[in-house]
Image: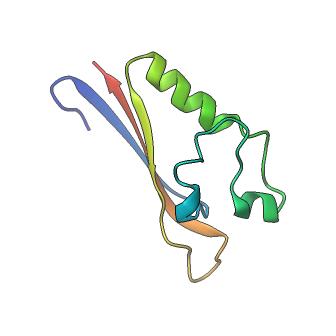
Amino acid sequence: FKSSNELNIVFEMDSLTIHDDEVDKIFSEGFSGNVARTYELNGNGIGLFLAKRMAVMNGGSLVMINGKPSQRDQKYARNTFTLALQT
């Protein structure tokens, strides 16, 4: 959605569970969440770090709201990422 001077792109998706105590760390360089490490699905911990850094370098932001783990499969949750860019 677009406001007067900002474009917000919202990604709402089923992805790996990110625990409440990991929300502030998830954009840190080298960090991978507990679920990602447990199931050996972690990378190098640079993807979200770089995505946020690029957003900020261009006057924007990238934030995440973690969802509760799915009752069907606890390693997944409905997470929401919002990329805000200046227009």
Q: Position of residue 66 (x, y in %)?
A: 48, 60
User: Can you say whether 85 is above or below 24 in the image?
Assistant: above
Residue farthest along the right direction in this orientation:
40
In the rendered image, the quadrant that contains the C terminus is top left
Foreground of the two, 78 or 45: 45
State the residue in front, 70 or 66. 66
Residue 78: x and y, percent?
A: 50, 64
**Based on the displayed image, in which of its 4 quarters is residue 62 positioned?**
top left
* In this view, 35 is above or below 51: below
**Tag count in the figure?**
0
Residue located 25% across and 27% down the image: 6
What residue sits 62% from the left and 39% below the top? Answer: 28
Residue drawn at 68 percent across, 56 percent down: 33
- Percent x, y for residue 69? 56, 73
Q: Identify the residue at image location x=68%, y=35%.
A: 29
Image quarter of residue 41: bottom right
Q: Quadrant of the N terminus?
A: top left
Rendered location of residue 83, percent (x, y): 41, 36
Could you tell whether 39 is left or right of 66 in the image?
A: right
Q: Quadrant of residue 3?
A: top left
Q: Which residue is situated farthest in the left direction here?
A: 4
Q: Residue furthest bottom?
A: 71
Instruction: Report the coloring of the rendering.
Output: rainbow
For residue 17, above or below residue 31: below
Q: Is residue 4 left or right of residue 87?
A: left
Nearest the viewer among 83 and 2 is 83
Say left or right for 11 vs 41: left
